[in-house]
Image (spheres, helix red, strand yellow):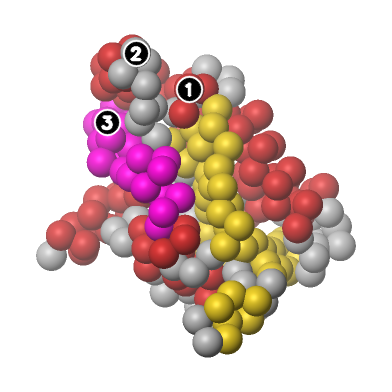
Amino acid sequence: MAEVSKRDRVFQVFQHISHSYDSGNRRISLGLEKSWKKLLVDAVLKSAAGAVLDVCSGTGDIAIALAARRPDLQITGLDFSPAMLTIAQEKGRMLTNLVWQEGDAMKLPFADNSFSAACISFGLRNTSDYERVLQEMRRVVCPGGWVYCLDSFVPDSPWVQPFYDIYFRMIMPVLGGGFGHHKEYQWLWQSTRNFLRRDQLLTLFCNVGLVEAGYKSRLFGACVLHWGQKPYAVKNDVVTM
């Protein structure tokens, strides 16, 4: 029941805030969201060749940026919220190398080894099973392909945490959602607070069979980009690269 409850709650949150999601994100990130997403897009484009999957695509910023910068790539943006996908479709309507699909991040509707890279931004913490999502992303990526995750984290520094807590618990919900949707943004803060720490997510990348795993932090660790590569082959429990 807990898994269903979380999924349903997240679904309702994004259905309700879809029209204000982009502007709300710009406000709560104090304008830094654009540079954080560029960090992810730049990383994906260094390794992508052919098809790329953007999981939990939301209103499509990452998928659209990838498609616009690399017309030679075929980008698929997947999300489980029809309302969010409607916004994404409108924003990306001029791009011919971009398709949208409604689907579940924990059961991706794609065959094994379908994409050269897969990414997820500010979405993993809102899923019910982080490991399962990463396993699915690893499954659909070709051997040698890369998996990326950009997300929000509670900073590890005890000096930063009090200021972070005050901002995200008291200021961010109203700044992002106003008085009409502040409860939805309170949930987004709760999902960050309950999320893994950055080193724990790095360990999870390794546990699902991704190699060359690492991360890069921004804003004292409040935003972190993780990455890992799917091995080319596994023989006798030894990874071959």
Where is mark 2, residue-wise?
159
**Residue 143 is at least partly visible in this image:** no
Q: Position of residue 142 (x, y in %)?
A: 66, 75
Q: Position of residue 96 (x, y in %)?
A: 80, 62
Q: Specify the quadrant of the image occupied by residue 169.
A: top left
Q: Earlier in the sequence, mark 3 or mark 1?
A: 3
Tell me the magenta residue range. 179-204
Between residue 125 and residue 62, name the one nearer to us: 125
Contact? badges 2 and 1 (CB < 8 Å)? no
Q: Specify the quadrant of the image occupied by residue 11.
A: bottom left
Relative vertical location of residue 176 with respect to residue 96 in this rendering, above or below: above
Where is mark 3, residue-wise?
186
The three-letter code of the residue at mark 3 reads: Gln
Using the image, tell me which numbered label, if any, was put on residue 220. Answer: 1
Q: Looking at the image, is mark 2 or mark 3 nearer the viewer?
A: 2
Q: Locate the N terminus and report the quarter of the image it occupies.
A: bottom left
Between residue 207 and residue 93, name the one nearer to us: 207
Q: Position of residue 136 (x, y in %)?
A: 47, 71
